[in-house]
Amino acid sequence: MDGDVRSSTRPTWKDATTVVALHPSSTAHGLLAGQFAAPYVVYSEKMATSRTFLRQVSVVGPMALLLFGGRMEVHHDGGYVLLDAWLKVWVAAQTAVLVKKLRQAWTALLDAKVQRPSEPFTRGQTAIVDTLVGLLREDAL
């Protein structure tokens, strides 16, 4: 969320190039900034009319972005991760490195499942899924 995030204002965000707002047809449009559980949203449609709007949005926490976001650059000295070369998420370097390893394990698990869809998860694969679910649940609180 960007700018004035008092509970009585409409939220706006910055994407890589501009300030965006919720489209009036979005189900979240009626919410004020203080009613969002997390500062980030993901969306499936962005449109430019009188200004740039987002439709079909879901609120997400920083861990979801770190786990499933785009290309991840860990900036150890700065204490943040840069996703897709523009979105800065503040996180300790040690945590960022562990998240990066978990992302790699998740990608390998998905690749294995695509190759052998009927094969059940191993204990290690189940542990990866359980870890992801636990982190996302904690992030949603």
Image (tube, rainbow, N blue to C red):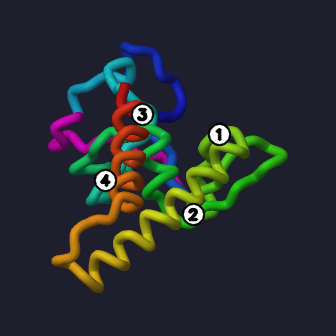
The label shown at residue 84 is 2
Distance between mark 4 and mark 1 Cα atoms: 23 Å
Residue at 74% x, 41% y is 79
The answer to whether residue 25 is magenta is: yes
Which of the two marks, 2 or 1, is nearer to us in this view? 1
> Which residue has dot 3 on it?
139
Q: Mark 1 or mark 4, which is nearer the start of the sequence?
A: 4
Residue stretch in magenta: 17-28
The label shown at residue 43 is 4
The reply to whether callout 4 and callout 3 are in contact (CB within 8 Å) is no
Name the residue type under label 3: Asp
| SS label for mark 4 | strand
Secondary structure, magenta segment, majority class: loop
Left or right: 81, with 117 as reference point: right
* Circle 4 residues within 10 Å: few <14, some 14–19, many ≥20: few
86 w.r.t. 141: above or below: below
Residue at 60% x, 44% y is 89
- Whole-percent x and y of residue 130? 35, 47
Q: Mark 4 or mark 2, which is nearer the start of the sequence?
A: 4
State the residue in front, 72 or 1.
72
Number of marks in picture: 4
Which of the two marks, 2 or 3, is nearer to us in this view? 3
* Circle 1 residues within 10 Å: few <14, some 14–19, many ≥20: some
